[in-house]
């Protein structure tokens, strides 16, 4: 057993372990994926990894994952146009993708709109109901009736 203990070039190690992939190919696959998903109103997905002919797609929730599972064959044939060596697609839920960025905050200093004046017949109805009401309700109904007179 004569083993060579010579150092191996880094490129050979990366190629052997397939840690290095073709960046232009990865970009092309991502572009095709995003256009396909846009056609089907699926948002927030990304390519995770391309290794051993297997492409990992990360998706934000399980509902979209099931939807994408049904379209897997169409997507695979589309992506094979750019990479004929692509054998399969794996889909994985990544909940961190669902965290939206730049959520607009609600304006806390919202201007309150005042109602327009109440018609006088409605105010008279409130006063008529107030005659037979309990003291707390009577006061509230009279207050509402006074609003129309302002």
Image (cartoon, helix red, strand yellow):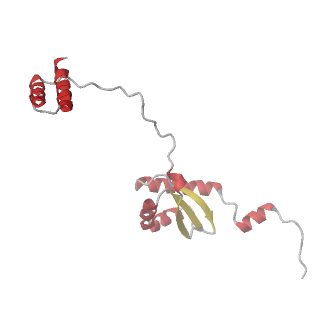
**Residue nearer the viewer, 97 or 12:** 97
- The residue at the far top in this view is 150
Q: Residue furthest bottom?
A: 1
Q: Is residue 89 left or right of residue 148?
A: right
Residue at the (63%, 69%) spot, across then down:
52
Q: Position of residue 32 (x, y in %)?
A: 51, 56
Residue 30 image position (x, y, % from top left): 55, 55
Q: Quadrant of the N terminus?
A: bottom right
Q: Is residue 73 left or right of residue 116?
A: right
**Residue pictured at 40% horizontal, 56% vertical:** 40
Q: Residue at x 57, y 67 (%)?
A: 86
**Which residue is outermost to the front?**
135
> For this view, does 16 lie left or right of residue 72?
right
Q: Is residue 147 above or below residue 42?
A: above
Q: Quadrant of residue 22?
A: bottom right
x and y percentages locating residue 29 in the rendered image: 55, 57
Which of the two residues, 85 or 10, is positioned nearer the viewer here?
A: 10
Q: Quadrant of the C terminus?
A: top left
Number of marks in the rendered image? 0
Q: In the rendered view, tell whether residue 135 sits above or below residue 23.
A: above
Q: Is residue 105 above or below residue 6?
A: above
Q: Position of residue 94 (x, y in %)?
A: 54, 58
Would residue 108 appear left or right of 21 to someone viewing this image?
A: left
Q: Is residue 42 above or below residue 88?
A: above
Q: Quadrant of residue 107?
A: top left
């Amino acid at each position: 057993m004569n083993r060579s203990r010579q150092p191996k070039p880094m490129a050979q190690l990366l190629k052997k372990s397939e840690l290095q992939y073709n960046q232009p190919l990865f970009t092309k696959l991502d572009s095709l994926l995003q256009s396909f998903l846009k056609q089907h109103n699926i948002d927030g997905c990304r390519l995770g990894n391309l290794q051993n002919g297997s492409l990992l797609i990360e998706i934000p929730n399980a509902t979209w994952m099931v939807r994408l599972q049904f379209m897997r064959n169409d997507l695979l044939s589309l992506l094979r146009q750019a990479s004929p060596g692509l054998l399969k697609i794996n889909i994985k839920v990544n909940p961190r993708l669902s965290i939206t960025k730049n959520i607009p905050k609600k304006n806390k200093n919202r201007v309150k709109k005042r109602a327009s004046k109440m018609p006088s017949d409605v105010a008279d109805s409130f006063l008529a109901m107030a005659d037979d009401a309990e003291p707390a309700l009577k006061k509230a109904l009279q207050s509402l009736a006074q609003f129309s007179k302002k």
